Amino acid sequence: MALALAALTVPTAALAHHGWSWTEDEESRLSGTIVTVHYGNPHAHLTVRNSQGVWEVDLAPPSATSRAGFVEGVAKPGDSASFTGHRARDPKTFGFKAETITVNGKTYDVYPRRAKTLKPAG
């Protein structure tokens, strides 16, 4: 019984982590200074600091970020970046799911098929 219950909770946890259900419906903007960059699986991830605090920013999986041109070396700690996307529903959580990232004067649309209401900065 416990094994069956555990098997049912794993897919749910994975969907909650990788889906959009944890984000607000309305698009918003975020900007700050990159602290860390991770280009690998399961998705690209950045840590960004601004006046509000330190944000955890998720991008698309590596195949999508690579197609968009957002590859290793494009962004590094210390670079300023701006994002469009969706912040976490919980206002106490500094989490953001980015659809676009603008860094060093270039914008990368890592979710080109998603409808967007905001234009990237820059």
Image: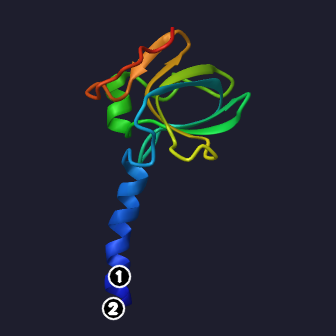
Residue at image point 51% right, 24% down: 83
Residue 6, position as x, y percentages in the image: 38, 79
Mark 2 highlights which residue?
1
Residue 87, position as x, y percentages in the image: 51, 37
Badge 1 crowding class, 10 Å Cα cut-off, few under 14, some 14 to 19, many 20 or more, is few
Residue at image point 44% right, 36% down: 59
| Residue 5: image tag | 1
Q: Quadrant of the N terminus?
A: bottom left
- Compute the Cα span from label 1 to label 2: 6 Å
SS at mark 1 in the image? helix
Number of disc labels:
2
SS at mark 2 in the image? loop
Badge 2 crowding class, 10 Å Cα cut-off, few under 14, some 14 to 19, many 20 or more, is few
Front one among 53 and 47: 53
Residue 110, position as x, y percentages in the image: 37, 28
Residue 118, position as x, y percentages in the image: 41, 18
Q: Give left or right: position of 16 versus 115.
A: right
Q: What is the basis of the colouring in this image?
A: rainbow
Instruction: Please say if 52 is above or below 5.
Output: above
Instruction: Please say if 106 is above or below 49.
Output: above
- Identify residue type, mark 1: Leu
| Residue 60: image tag | none
Mark 1 touching mark 2, by CB under 8 A? yes
- Identify residue type, mark 2: Met
Q: Give left or right: position of 85 versus 63.
A: right
As drawn, the residue found furthest toward the left would be 113
